[in-house]
Image (spheres, helix red, strand yellow):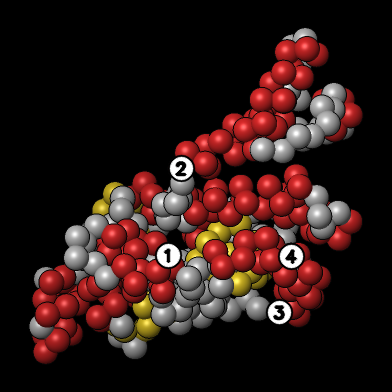
Amino acid sequence: MKLGCIEDSGNQKRLAPLLRFYSSKNETDLISLDQYVENMPETQKAIYYIATDSLQSAKTAPFLEKLLQKDIEVLYLIEPIDEVAIQNLQTYKEKKFVDISKEDLELGDEDEDKEETKQEYTLLCDWIKQQLGDKVAKVQISKRLSSSPCVLVSGKFGWSANMERLMKAQTLGDTSSLEFMRGRRIFEINPDHPIVKDLSAACKNEPESTEAKRAVELLYETALISSGYTPESPAELGGKIYEMMTIALGGRWGRSGTEEAETNADVDSSEGVVTEVVEPSEVRTENENDPWRD
């Protein structure tokens, strides 16, 4: 039936009611598009969906956060053919299908406060874009996040992370098209998250800080994974995570100063940078919300 929606355009309207999907409100039972539309509030103008490689990936995707908070149902497209079938349908009962992992997501709650926030964080967005360069098309404030610090979304006409994964799996895939679509990724940040607030302070007070620039790189590469993309160098990402863990844990449980100095020297040499060894007490202040605090 899903294949018919792709290949048999003349019978799409007859086949569409027979399609079944899981959703954010029905994770164990498949539902029809008719059921989804019937459950929609009157103010909802679109059918929202996300395409992933598994039900678990769909349920934990950061793109869902604000929609779940607003009690908006999202269809989970977890089979390889699902996304193509929905894209071919385009609409159902005059309701447009909207991929929540793409830019310009409209949830009907845009107001002046968000515009003020956008203006407030313009400097940070420009600074992050400068650090990431051509890795992203632009950096902007997110409308879809509530608990995650950031997310990586695709352009309106670009491939989703799921489609990119499927295209990579095609042995005869056009790599030039893949590179073009990848260039339209957009980095969205959550202005209410502590990490983003810290980076905002860094770009205003110490824009050349090496630590802040490293944090931006790690934030971006972490967003790659949580958004469904594959990092270009998993080993390099692992090294950055280990480095941050070394800084966070250094000397916390009474390791000797000599051992700590040797470890820090090894980390610095691996980066090709020589820096001054600083005692943990000098770089870290007491914070009641510190997850490592005893």
First reached walking from the N terminus: tag 2 or tag 3: 3
| Secondary structure beneath label 1 | loop
Residue type, mark 3 in image: Asp
Relative to 278, is 227 above or below?
below
First reached walking from the N terminus: tag 1 or tag 3: 1
Reading the image, the residue beneath label 1 is 73
User: Tag on residue 234?
Assistant: 2
| Secondary structure beneath label 4 | helix
Query: Could you tell me if residue 132 is visible in this image?
Result: yes
Instruction: Locate the C terminus and report the quarter of the image it occupies.
Output: top right
Contact check, label 1 and label 3, Cβ < 8 Å: no
Q: Quadrant of residue 104?
A: bottom right
Q: Point out residue 109 in the picture as x, y percentages from the top left corner.
A: 63, 76
Nearer to the camera, 268 or 290: 268
Mark 2 nearby-residue class (10 Å; few <14, some 14–19, many ≥20): few
Residue type, mark 1 in image: Glu
Contact check, label 4 and label 1, Cβ < 8 Å: no
| Secondary structure beneath label 2 | helix
